[in-house]
Amino acid sequence: MVMLMFTHQPLQALKFNRFNGRQLIMTALKRFANDPWSWTVFALWIFPTICSAHGFGERYDLPVPMNWVILCSCMVVAISFLWTPFMTQGSSAARHSPLKLDASNPHLQAPSLNTLPQRVGSLVSCALLILVWSCASFGSQDPLMNFAPTFIWITWWLGSSLACLLFGNVWTNLDPWMGIYLFAKKIKDRLHLDHEHMSHRSRSKNFKTWPKFLARWPACATLLIWCALEIVYPIASMPHRLGTCIAFYSLYTWAGLYAFGPTQWRTHADGFGLYFELIAQMRERLIHAFKHQAEMHVSSTPSSPHHDSEPSLSKESNFSSWMTSFESASCRLSTIAFVMAMFSSVLFDGLHAGQSWLMFEKFATHLPLLNNDVNGYMTGALGLILLWALLIGVYLLTCFLSARLVRQVPSYKDFENQLNFNTTRLALSFLSCLLPIAVAYLIAHNFSSFFIQGQNIIALASDPFGWRWDLWGSANYYPDITLIDAKLTWYVASISIVLGHVLSVFMAHQTACALSAQLHELSFQAMLKEPRLAYDITTIKPWVLNIPMTLVMLGLTALSLSIIAEPLTNPVSL
């Protein structure tokens, strides 16, 4: 059973609907009469110790009790917070590098397709999109033999996320929907006879203005629906429905590109594009932070002070202008909700396979609308939405507490109008600090799936339709299931989670330093205008501002480690 699970079946195809016992047995017996493979599927479902979450095929006994692991991990995160006051930091607020999700970001604009690599990349991605849709729609409906499920859930989704983490936003020039749209538009322009009329006509007039009330909610909904299809609805085990979803999303995307243009669509409605862009921006910010620390350590000589004695008197702060841009686009809450959807998509995957989910299902059966939810689709969707809303509420509450700490600073009321550190502004400023945790969850939950189940793509590439082809001579390739074991998976998952929270603490400290420097600069400029204020320069310690966020990170560390360890140390039993 373990061999079959690792060698062929994609991860999501192992998630089946829960029927009552009698209905499940009758369904399995009927299918077994015509297809013996259905009995194997039934056995995988009925023995959860064999098919546990994230493809763990064996039980692993931790070297120390789980409580000790959680305690030590939380201590590491706490020590990193205690170390932040001793980090070398500049005093300029312009050093803060916030998220850039507006039209000024070149990665969120349409690629030009002027260079040969861009054209080749777009052609390859377009061909892959057509191949995947064709395999899902016309190929074998056995998910073990179809190229589409493994490619979409493992190779594309996980592979693209890891590629953006390592090399930057590679998705910009590999988006097949954008590539087909641009190729079609170029062909249309070339076939148009009146070239002078086309050159004088403004292209911007052809596109509608994006409604402000929509903000980035379509992108957030796209990511949540994608998560529900992956975890709640067993779409991976039904290639024909997967092909239907691809066709529907393609039409939806091309209609949006035609109506609103590539830039507006990418910055507001393209959930996948924004997801990969946020991962790439986290990478860039970490590189920038490490370079800044190295430069500050090199420049800190005994003859020079450790910090600037006077803040820079810049006319326009990068932080303030960024806040204004988000405010004018009315995207504050939807941007926060989108990042929380990144958390929900991975955290819910672990919760859905644990004991806590069984308790939630038992509770949901007593609700009026869910007592007849045999398949568990409505219960799963409700659980995902509740988790997403809970994460948003906890994060906004944390930023509210940070805003209350800022208001306790003496003389803050003199600069309250210029700063206006309310809950949503602080939530936007700290938003980029949460990205390392989301990426750490992604690695922890999908490490074994990518390296074990991802090997199936080698055999499926020779027989993509499941028609017993052998195009490249690799149709009989079987994955090496000894490549990754439960022990290595546990170490990678635990280290990535702890490291992600530590990086988030350091990035939150940088953001707090930028907020503190902003307050310091305003008070210093006021002092120059009014010499009587020379004795009262307003400031706040960055580590004080970062206390609520660190407490939340400690709780997330304990929760995520418990979720990761449960399938290995305490398999789910029904």
Image: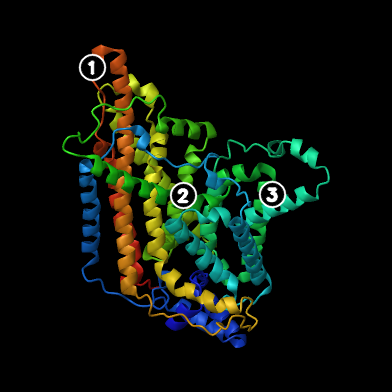
Q: Residue 372 vs residue 133: left or right?
A: left
Residue type indicated by callout 2: Leu
Q: Quadrant of the N terminus?
A: bottom left
Residue shown at 32% from the left, 20% from the top: 525
Residue type indicated by callout 1: Ala
Label 3 secondary element: helix
Q: Which one is closest to the eye, mark 2 or mark 3?
A: 2
Label at residue 534: 1
Q: Is residue 393 above or below residue 490?
A: above
Label 1 close to label 3 by CB (< 8 Å): no
Among the two numbered marks 2 and 1 on one chain, the one whose residue lies closer to the N terminus: 2
Q: CA distance from mark 2 to mark 3?
A: 24 Å
Label 2 secondary element: helix
Residue at numbered disc 3: 255
Residue at numbered disc 2: 278
Q: CA distance from mark 2 to mark 1?
A: 42 Å
Q: Position of residue 335 (x, y in %)?
A: 48, 42
**Camera sees residue 359:** no
Residue type indicated by callout 3: Ala
Quadrant of res 295: top left
Q: Is residue 192 above or below residue 347?
A: above
Label 1 secondary element: loop
Label 2 close to label 1 by CB (< 8 Å): no
